[in-house]
Image (cartoon, helix red, strand yellow):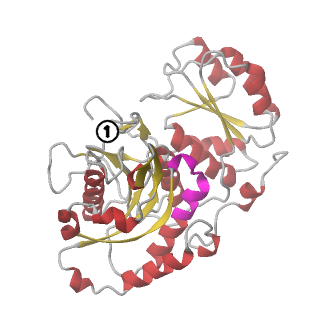
């Protein structure tokens, strides 16, 4: 058994997964009221409109500028008033402002509470709806989207689409309205095709949340997909939205979310960069709070050998599993002496984004707290599609 095991790891996963008493940031009464309101809708009154649930969390989309500084200010109803009328004619949107914050200030507690809220609404809403849209700040969208995808588990019976904007919705050149529109149409297409996925929609791209990474802080295409092909592309202006044929429904196993306790990761991320002090990294690796390590290699897969020599003995001593993640769109390739050394010393390559790897390790630590071998097997196997298949793999032109 590990010499140190934090309380949140020992608790495992939240049971039941829709326990609103666990909410500290989101108003539980508002969640119950939303479910009751939706259940009170006459489906016949909707006509051809599709029912979607939207949860707003703040971010740039919901900000106003005061004395040159952007601050979260707008609630969900404020956002919906500024969305294209054609959207409201096509969709009936119900939802709540879950919280209103700059996403750079979020941690896993925010993701956990959104997950609890979503599971509660799914379990208690009795009329058909097409899924969930979450408006979110772009700084942590890849981390949050990957985490909620992992938290929902393998039996996800509905889709979740994350979207945000590079400019506040009330600014003249805001991309918010188009992104909300594309998110809703993507959600509709997933529903109509009997698919269940967690996506990020920004600019003219839709991609798996477990593959999305932020690559721009001002351009419309703020995110790119570093492992998988795009799920959809909006630059052709096609309707219905054509989603990728390699997507598979995740509805053939029971819906058993793995929502973990704890607000912070137990993984030490060592990003390859020139001048890292091996003594500092060794100290961090030996801390009780460190329960796994991710070596974030250079794009070539290479790692400073002095860092390897500092990390690997400490990890072995404390029975900590070490993983290697390549930041670019490829498997971890053993092309250089340092990458060969990393693998020979026991580091385990992962073909997924850092965002997905961080979330997945939290599940692995709770499933296999005293079994590094089983933890490694879990991390290298596909759980919710975070590892690309031959059909989904990133390629030029997608």
Which residue is identified by label 1?
221
The residue located at (51%, 15%) in the rendering is: 335
| Residue 25 sits in quarter | bottom right
Q: Position of residue 54 (x, y in %)?
A: 38, 66
User: Please, is residue 178 above or below residue 119 in the view?
Assistant: above
Q: Which residue is painted at 68% across and 28% down in the image?
A: 346
Is residue 341 shown left or right of residue 185?
A: right
Q: Is residue 110 magenta?
A: yes
- In the shown orientation, is residue 381 left or right of residue 131? right
Instruction: Name the spot of residue 1 as percent of width and height, x first.
Output: 82, 48
**In the image shown, does 232 or 395 lie closer to the viewer?**
232
Residue drawn 65% across the image and 15% down it: 275
Secondary structure character of the magenta stretch overall: helix
Q: Which of these two is toward me, 229 or 148?
A: 148
Q: Is residue 153 visible?
A: no
Instruction: Name the spot of residue 145 as percent of width and height, x first.
Output: 46, 51
Part of the protein shown in magenta? 103-114
Q: Residues within 10 Å of mark 1 (few under 14, many from 20)?
A: some
At 71% across and 42% down in the image, what residue appears? 372
Q: Residue furthest top?
A: 337
């Amino acid at each position: 058994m590990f010499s140190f095991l934090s309380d949140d790891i020992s608790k495992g996963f939240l049971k039941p997964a829709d326990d609103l008493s666990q909410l500290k940031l989101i108003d539980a009464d508002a969640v119950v009221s939303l479910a009751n309101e939706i259940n009170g809708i006459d489906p016949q009154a909707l006509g051809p409109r599709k029912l979607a649930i939207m949860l707003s969390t703040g971010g740039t989309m919901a900000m106003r500028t005061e004395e040159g500084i952007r601050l979260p200010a707008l609630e969900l109803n404020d956002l919906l008033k500024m969305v294209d009328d054609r959207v409201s004619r096509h969709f009936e949107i119900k939802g709540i402002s879950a919280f209103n914050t700059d996403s750079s200030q979020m941690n896993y507690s925010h993701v956990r509470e959104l997950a609890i809220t979503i599971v509660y609404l799914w379990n208690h809403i009795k009329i058909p709806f097409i899924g969930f849209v979450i408006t979110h700040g772009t700084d942590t969208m890849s981390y949050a989207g990957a985490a909620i995808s992992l938290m929902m588990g393998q039996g996800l019976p509905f889709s979740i689409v994350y979207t945000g904007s590079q400019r506040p919705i009330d600014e003249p050149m805001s991309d918010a309205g188009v992104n909300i529109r594309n998110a809703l149409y993507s959600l509709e297409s997933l529903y109509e095709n009997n698919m269940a996925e967690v996506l990020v929609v920004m600019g003219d791209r839709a991609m798996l949340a477990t593959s999305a990474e932020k690559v721009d802080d001002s351009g419309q295409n703020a995110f790119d997909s570093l492992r998988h092909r795009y799920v959809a592309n909006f630059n052709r202006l096609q309707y219905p939205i054509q989603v990728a044929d390699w997507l598979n429904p995740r509805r053939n196993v029971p819906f058993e979310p793995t929502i973990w306790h704890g607000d912070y990761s137990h993984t030490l991320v060592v990003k390859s960069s020139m001048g890292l002090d091996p003594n500092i990294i060794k100290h961090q690796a030996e801390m009780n709070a460190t329960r796994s390590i991710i070596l974030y290699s250079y794009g070539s897969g290479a790692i400073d050998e002095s860092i390897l020599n500092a990390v690997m003995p400490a990890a072995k001593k404390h029975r900590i599993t070490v993983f290697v993640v390549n930041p670019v769109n490829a498997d971890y390739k053993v092309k250089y002496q340092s990458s060969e050394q990393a693998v020979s010393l026991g580091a385990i390559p992962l073909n997924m984004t850092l965002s997905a790897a961080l979330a997945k390790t939290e599940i692995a630590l709770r499933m296999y707290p005293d079994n590094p071998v089983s933890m490694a097997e879990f991390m290298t196997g596909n759980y919710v599609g975070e590892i690309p298949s031959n059909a989904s793999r990133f390629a030029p032109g997608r």
